[in-house]
Image: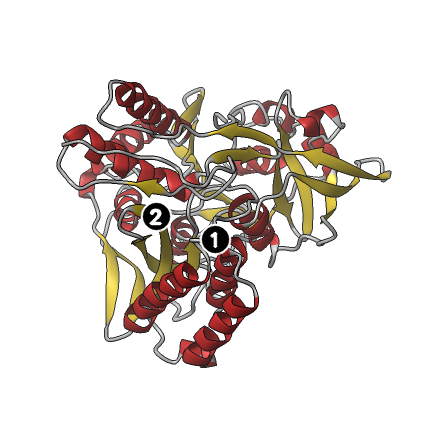
Amino acid sequence: MTNESEAPVQNPDAFIVRKTKSGKNNRIARCLVLMALAWLLAPPAQAQQNASYGHGVANDMLDRVSHDMQKHYYDPAFHGVDWNAKVRETKKKFQDDKNLEMSIAHIAAALDSLNDSHTFLLPPSRSSHHEYGFRTEMDGDRCFIAHTLPGSDAEAKGVKRGDELLAVNGYRPTRENIWKINYIFRTLRPQPGLTLDLQDPAGQHRQVAVLAKHKETQQLTDLSSGAADSIIWEMIRQEEYEAHLMRARSISVGESLMILKLPEFDFEAGKVDEFMGRARKYPALILDLRDNPGGSVETLKRVLGNLFDKDIKICDRNGRKESKPEIAKTRGDSVFAGKLIVLVNCQSASASELLARVVQLEKRGQVVGDRSSGSVMAARHYDYKEGMDTVMFYGASITESNLLMGDGKSLEHTGVTPDETVLPTAADLASNRDPALSRAAAMLGVKISPEAAGKLFPFEWPKL
């Protein structure tokens, strides 16, 4: 088939929209699948929208999302929110402001009104990747700069690991709103730059304006041409690099301890069995789930099945119409039977929180670090598109089940409280020390200094 594609919106930071013709072609199908994956991660940038994608498109987007919310959201009462009234209120805002970007922000705000960690809008991708050059982390109730990208404007302006972030564009980050700040400025409405109020480890205050770095994504002009192959393979290479960043990493300390860092729960059963098989060679295991946002329940079950010598109920899934248990089946004689410590922090979410709490409730091991995110629901992603000739892709994550642990409680907005809380100080971060990992090792009888612990798993930046 022939398949033509062009971007009618000329602003390079605009939402990506494409003109297409129907037909069949395996290369193109694969490319479209990759693009569908890409928009989940690609950070958009601020833009002015083509008038043809304004009021009418926003109404259609909201109608599609609202239809699935009313059909699939686990709580038909919407936590007391009058959802129909919320939809009408949002459409009224469309009439007052016909700019598509603002309308999409209004849709996101409508979903956010439910205060549900797993229900949110997945906005259309942009034609530009957007990078501010720094990453943050919450430690206790304080927000710190965790990493600064080499060569970025943030690095040039002196933004450093260990600086406390007091405000972003005037907004004070807290445990409760840090994800919203990141969602707004990195996904929903990125800015050309951000103003950071910082305090260094010595207590000195300063304000820094950092500029974002942009990289235009490849615009597909003719998928039937030879140039399409290079575009598709570049997307494949990018996906492979992202998979590399999400690999499991392990370190052995003599014959006494294995430290296994899982950045997410998205591994096939065989891969889980492989790294847990290596752990069985050691009498003790530290499972590092810090910054792990969760992922597949099947991966979670497989990890737990490698940690327990009996079947374990993870939780009960309470949906709109039914409740059912989630069970992790033991691997019997193949399980890791040694001592176990699980590391978590404020960025540990969803499946990583479930694992840590199961370990606590079943008294299988200890949890060390910071209180986890409190983002624990079961959701499904729904994909949508607008237009026939001109197509715009977007989506929504919709919670379909609440999860109740073995003690009958939900972790949503609560998180997992560690058995022992260990938080890095500003000085620890500035010196790249890891006191939590050091303490966990000491609890298992292994000496690792905070300085040495901080070098075990170097941070890796995604490619811009």
Give the side of residue 322 with respect to residue 378, left or right.
left
Mark on residue 51? 1
* Amino acid of disc 1: Ala
Q: Which sits in the foreground, 175 or 56?
A: 56
Give the side of residue 159 with respect to residue 70, left or right.
right
Whether residue 87 is visible, yes or no, is yes
Q: Which residue is mark 2?
A: 393
| Quarter of the image where one finds residue 83 | bottom left
- Which of labels 2 and 1 is toward the front? 1
Say above or below: 349 vs 240. Answer: below
Q: Secondary structure at mark 1?
A: loop
Residue 461 point in image, percent of width and height: 52, 27
Residue occupying image coordinates x 71% and y 54%: 171
Q: Residues within 10 Å of mark 1 (few under 14, many from 20)?
A: few
Q: Which sits in the foreground, 282 or 370?
A: 370
Quadrant of image for the N terminus: top left
Q: Which sits in the foreground, 326 or 387?
A: 387
